[in-house]
Image: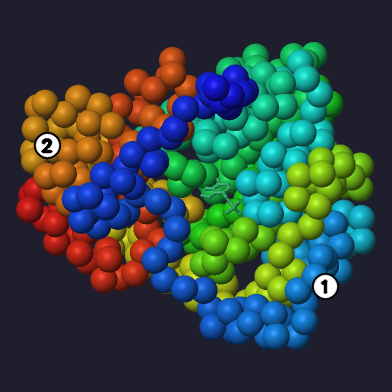
């Protein structure tokens, strides 16, 4: 019987599906998946409805609606002083996920190498494998998730085509400092390598931390492709509107693939995305304050339950080190067992971070768990009540 190709058979199914199914089965409070359980801002939702009613329902241009490309460029200038030509240096994609796949397909050739930092967001490596590209891993080490500059330098060679940097980082909450980006930038320039940055959490930062944009570092504008999207900043993860920004040559490479993957993405949602990106700065400040309060509450609940919290600087998640917590039975030996136990015995779902590591490195995450912050206050309170029983 015909079946799936080897290309995808090797991926298997992710632990995320198992965790979600187990959480549903046991009625657990789900702090696993990184999607809000609340809606986006009413003016943005209204803009989508009015675009549908206003007959914006046919194909958009492949590169994206001009008004959205302009809004993306204006947003980049407003927050980072980055100057982009919306006609040639911005393209709209089906979320950051498609942007990354189109970037890998459009900017690398089979046999090239691409450097990633581990833990690594789960789509990047499968994207590379589908493109015939070899991943090279550099480890971020807990508890502060720094990398060894020598290990990074050793990962570059004549086959290196690109390096992917996700900041603020999922799952750790790390924000790459300007100094760290500078180290990466120097290596990119020395080896003529492209930096592809995934900045979907750019507006979710804590304790006054600043998100740094690689493309604004000296000498990096011409070799950086910046990826971001609407989902996290506007709590509309289901809309899947994303974009790439960068020099014309890189954007053309992405579009070379994008035109034959999706061609164009949802017109009315692009119109609403333009409205969203044009919201006043108070929207972005309020978003930050809301998430700060949620993160602080969740950190407090996890600490009260006896866990060591690895404080995130940004993004949607809080990681804990659960070793030695007195409520955890001795039979729980790794992060997958911990997540299953927490769902079935405590009624709270989290994600085992070993899902973000290659097989040989999964042990680096065996003592960790990842909890999502992006939930209604009542959801977080319900989780806190259940976790309190562990104390
Ligand atoms: C690091 C990172 N990149 C990309 C995405 C997906 O973004 P989008 O929904 O815009 O495709 C996520 C979502 O969880 C993420 O955490």
Left or right of 53? Residue 148 is: left
Q: Element at badge 2?
A: loop
- Neighbor class of circle 1 (other Cα within 10 Å; few <14, some 14-19, many 20+) is some
Side of 218 where 212 appears, left or right: left
Q: From this viewpoint, which residue is outermost toward the front?
A: 1
The residue located at (71%, 47%) in the rendering is: 99
Disc 2 and disc 1 in contact, CB within 8 angstroms: no
**Looking at the image, which residue is at 56% across and 55% down?**
201
Establish if 71 lies above or below 308. Answer: below
Q: Is residue 295 visible?
A: yes
Q: Position of residue 75 (x, y in %)?
A: 73, 67
Ranked by sequence position, the earlier of labels 2 and 1 is: 1
Find disc 2 in the rendering and name its residue: 328
Residue 257 image point, x, y percent: 81, 40
Q: From where the camera sits, is residue 219 visible?
A: no
**Front residue of 5 and 323:** 5
Q: Nearer the viewer, mark 2 or mark 1?
A: 1
- Report the residue marked by disc 1: 67
Location of residue 204 with respect to 319 vertically, above or below: below
């Amino acid at each position: 019987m015909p079946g799936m190709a080897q290309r995808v058979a090797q991926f298997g199914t992710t632990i995320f599906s198992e965790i979600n199914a187990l959480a549903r089965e046991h009625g657990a409070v789900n702090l696993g998946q990184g999607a809000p359980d609340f809606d986006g801002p009413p003016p943005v939702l209204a803009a989508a409805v009015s675009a549908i009613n206003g007959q914006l329902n046919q194909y958009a241009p492949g590169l994206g609606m001009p008004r959205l490309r302009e809004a993306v460029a204006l947003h980049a200038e407003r927050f980072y002083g980055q100057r982009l030509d919306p006609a040639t240096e911005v393209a709209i994609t089906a979320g950051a996920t498609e942007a990354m796949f189109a970037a890998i397909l459009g900017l690398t050739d089979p046999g090239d190498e691409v450097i990633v930092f581990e833990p690594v967001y789960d789509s990047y490596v499968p994207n590379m494998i589908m493109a015939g590209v070899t991943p090279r891993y550099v480890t971020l080490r807990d508890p502060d998730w720094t990398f060894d500059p020598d290990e990074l330098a050793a990962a570059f060679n004549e086959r290196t085509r690109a390096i992917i940097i996700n900041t603020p980082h999922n799952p750790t909450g790390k924000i790459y400092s300007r100094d760290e980006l500078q180290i990466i930038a120097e290596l990119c320039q020395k080896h003529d390598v492209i930096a592809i940055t995934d900045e979907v959490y750019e507006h979710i930062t804590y304790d006054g931390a600043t998100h740094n944009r690689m493309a604004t570092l000296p000498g990096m504008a011409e070799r950086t492709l910046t990826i971001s999207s609407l989902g996290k900043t506007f709590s509309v993860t289901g809309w899947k509107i994303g974009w790439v920004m960068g020099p014309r040559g890189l954007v053309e490479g992405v579009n070379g693939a994008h035109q034959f993957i999706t061609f164009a993405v949802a017109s009315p949602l692009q119109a609403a995305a333009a409205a969203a990106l044009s919201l006043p700065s108070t929207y972005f400040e309020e978003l930050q304050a809301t998430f700060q309060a949620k993160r602080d509450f969740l950190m407090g609940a996890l600490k009260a339950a006896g866990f060591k919290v690895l404080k995130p600087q940004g993004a949607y998640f809080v990681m804990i080190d659960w070793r030695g917590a007195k409520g955890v039975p001795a039979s729980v030996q790794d992060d997958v067992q911990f997540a299953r136990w927490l769902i079935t015995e405590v009624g709270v779902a989290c994600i085992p971070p070993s899902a973000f590591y290659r097989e040989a490195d999964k042990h680096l995450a065996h003592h960790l768990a990842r909890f999502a912050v992006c939930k209604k206050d009542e959801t977080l309170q319900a989780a806190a009540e259940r976790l309190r029983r562990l104390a």
